[in-house]
Amino acid sequence: MVEVKDKPEADTNGKRREQMLAPDSLLMTFGADEPLALDCGAELASYSLAYQTYGELNADKSNAVIICHALTGDQHAANIHPVTDKEGWWETMVGPGKPIDTDRFFVICVNHIGGCMGSTGPSSVNPETGQAYGLDFPVITIGDMVRAQASLVDRLGIRDLFCVIGGSMGGMQVLEWATSYKDRVFAAIPIATAARHSSQNIAFHEVGRQAVMADPDWRGGRYVEEGTQPRKGLAVARMAAHITYLSDEALHRKFGRNLQDRERVTFGFDADFQVESYLRYQGYTFVDRFDANSYLYMTRAMDYFDIAADHGGDLPRAFEGTQTRFCCVSFTSDWLFPTEETRTVVQALNAVAANVSFVEIETDKGHDAFLLHEPELFDAVSGFLSAAAQKRGLAPHDKEH
């Protein structure tokens, strides 16, 4: 039997709020002389980015790797999370001797603009009002996130990135980096992603947003100043989204129709089945580490993503002239970002004679496979990075200062 609790043991929302205001990570602040111009036509006159680094930058600053996190991730990719006390979300991939080898590469992971773990977002204090931005925060795009990251990289004195890597929404940012900063990205690894968000995925996101906004504690997005939190709405949004991250095979293997802590059904609406209990746990633990308004903004940014539309409707045109080396990865059981979406990107790259390899990994773990123990993914990333590092002229375990 799989034992899953319906609720977390403790409410960590207070810890998350503390991390929003004073993160246990590096923080880069940009003043009014460095505003961030946004695709919506507005600008952030000042903003901050919370980030983590792993490994050491070499003497010529040629070994920097940017990890772009997914929708509900943050900068804590390979360290203990300060809110949940759990391992980083990509501990399987990042670290000494791992595929993204911190003995060899200087790794940067940034909490995206609009996020809720220290980077400026809707729960940050609006300097004009002294209250949380709420929905006064401007709507952001994947392009805005990448421009903010580029500003941070500039501030760190890094001209060229050895590699940009990420999955899902992180993969969208990889593609944005590779098309908007062609001369700054040596290698790119977009995983389980697409060049634009599908109508089905937009529909899933709308269900989640409506669940949040239907919660009376959302208060029109002003819940921070009114001392409430739309826990139930955000939990339901997370539950619905989490289903899309898994495959039918994975759910059946893990839960089947097994009952939760009972011999027979109750003929009621408690969590009779293990899968119900699991989803409730996922929902109620999520609300303590993530901000509801940030969820609205992050999902909207994904919805607006469409590289071809930004280049006259011509996807190959977006990659024209690229010298970046690409490794595109998909998973056979990922129905949220199916392999066909990755093939579309690969075909566009082939159309402009780009250097691209494509790996479709056989797995029944669904979209979340890139976050799980997947040896074929480890081998693909490790092999690609090793070959790219050799081409780049990076010595193994280069720690030279």
Image: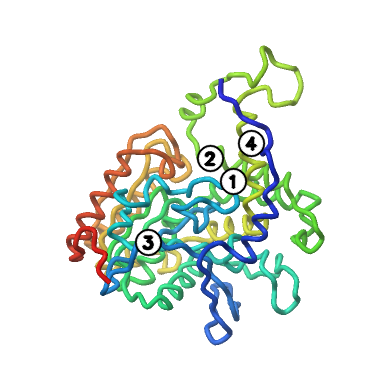
Numbered label attached to residue 244? 2
Q: Quadrant of residue 129?
A: bottom right
Locate residue 243: give its quadrant. top right
Locate residue 372 relative to residue 251 in the image: left or right.
Answer: left
The span from disc 1 to disc 4 (Cα, nearest Å) is 20 Å
Q: Quadrant of the N terminus?
A: top right
- 10 Å neighbourhood of mark 4: few (<14), some, or many (≥20)? some
Q: Give coordinates of residue 113: x percent, y percent.
A: 55, 66
What residue is pinned by disc 3? 107
Amino acid under label 3? Answer: Val
- What residue is at 24 percent from the left and 52 percent from the top? 384
Label 2 Cα neighbours within 10 Å, binned few <14 / some 14-19 / many ≥20? some
**Nearer to the camera, 179 or 22:** 22
Check the picture and name the quadrant holding the C terminus: bottom left
Please tell me whether mark 4 sits on a helix, a strand or a loop. helix
**Residue shown at 45%/41% (left/top)?**
367
For marks 4 and 2 on the same chain, the one whose residue lies earlier in the sequence:
2
Image mark for residue 281 = 4
For the residues labelled 4 and 3, say whether their Cβ atoms are less than 8 Å apart. Answer: no
- The numbered mark, 1 or 2, whose residue comes first in the sequence reads 1
Q: Which amino acid is tagged 1?
A: Phe
Farthest residue, direction bottom? 33
Tell me the distance, in whole angstroms, between the alpha carbons under discs 3 and 2. Answer: 29 Å
- Kindly report the distance in space between the C-alpha atoms of the residues bearing marks 4 and 3: 32 Å
User: Along the polypeptide, which appears first: circle 1 or circle 3?
Assistant: 3
- Name above or below for residue 322 compared with residue 129: above
Task: Provide the residue designation for mark 1.
Answer: 204
